[in-house]
Amino acid sequence: MLLRTIFSVAIPAAILVAEAAGTGEAVDEAFFEARVRPVLAGTCVKCHGADKQSGGLRLDSLEAMLRGGDSGPAVVPGDPDGSILVEAIRQEEALLRMPPGDEPLSGQAIADLVSWIEAGAPWPEATAAGPIDAETHWAFRPLQDVEAPADPTGWASSPIDRLIAVGHREAGLHPVERADRRTLIRRASFDLLGLPPTPERIERFVSDPSPDAYERLIDELLSSPLYGERWGRYWLDLARYADTAGDNSDYPIPEAYLYRDYVIDAFNDDVPYDRFLHEQLAGDILAAEGPEEDYARRVGCDRRMM
């Protein structure tokens, strides 16, 4: 019985390995990404990953495979027959076979895993992420001024422009012609308010001779209540805000507008993003700190609205 079991599994697998090898496909990191990682991620990591380690075994990194679990190393590079992983996926008995369940891995998937281990189990180094060093990682470093190189063409009018000009020169590109004032005010108004500028506002901007006219235009648009309505709607869409339930009855949601107005006001008041998130998550707790009376309802944390 044992010999029959061994030959019934080993011979088809050997044929598939031979077929894979016969194609001349290199068993390297690209092979791993295309043929092996999907198998591990789709059938193994659920029980042998970061959240769960059946038998003390993880299969989400080569280091973890080599370290193994309660039964020893899962993979022996260069020796598929000596690898517990291969032994488990080749089992004929459903109770012993991995992955558990009625459906075993396909013959091709088994062949790919065998070929990968036989080739030394190549694993891309970039996927073995270690802990982030907060002292050296750029995201945790304090902000520093960057000295932008000079622009010999005279096109740049700001440090950001000078950095862009460097990219232009390196790519052999030339900046487009400067937009006229009518184009600038239309772009700014549509971007910040979502509405076209009035004819009177266009004429006032076009006829303004001051060099800081554009900066003052941007400040004016940012101070408009329409700015919060324009950009607050993206957050409201993300939060799935609605004035009514939206189902068959479509009944109105009492005081839902308070949350809508709160989001619009937060954008218009330029509330710091971390504070904005805190208010979303713990508005009822923060209400005890003494903001306005309807604060908890405004941030959607009033228990009567849940």
Image: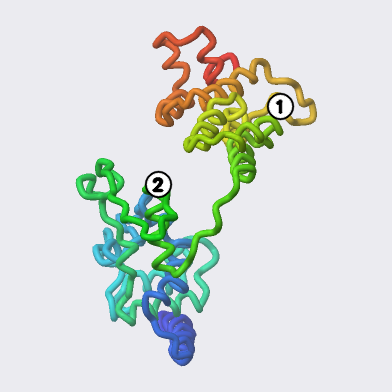
* Left or right, residue 166 beside residue 215: left
How many numbered tags mark residues here? 2
Q: Amino acid at mark 2?
A: Ser
Residue sitting at 51 percent across and 69 percent down? 104
Q: Residue at x 64, y 20 (%)?
A: 257
Mark 1 = which residue? Answer: 245
In this rendering, the answer to whether 185 lies above or below 57 is above
**Which is more foreground, mark 2 or mark 1?**
2
Q: In which quadrant will I find the N terminus?
A: bottom left
Which badge, 2 or 1, is on the more N-terminal residue? 2
Q: What mark, if any, has residue 158 been given in the picture?
A: 2
Residue 154: name its quadrant: bottom left
Q: Nearer the viewer, residue 34 or 69?
A: 34
Q: Please tell me which residue is depicted at 65% across the width and 35% down the height of the picture.
A: 202
Q: Position of residue 204 (x, y in %)?
A: 63, 31
Tell me the element at label 1. loop
Instruction: Identify the amino acid type marked 1.
Output: Ala
- In the picture as drawn, the residue positioned furthest to the right comes out as 248
Q: Is residue 58 above or below residue 218?
A: below
Q: Which mark is residue 105?
A: none
Q: Position of residue 16 (x, y in %)?
A: 48, 85
Toward the viewer: 85 or 78?
Answer: 78
Which x, y percent locates residue 78? 29, 80
Q: Is residue 17 above or below residue 246?
A: below
Q: Is residue 6 left or right of residue 137?
A: right
- The residue sitting at 60% across, 17% down in the picture is 258
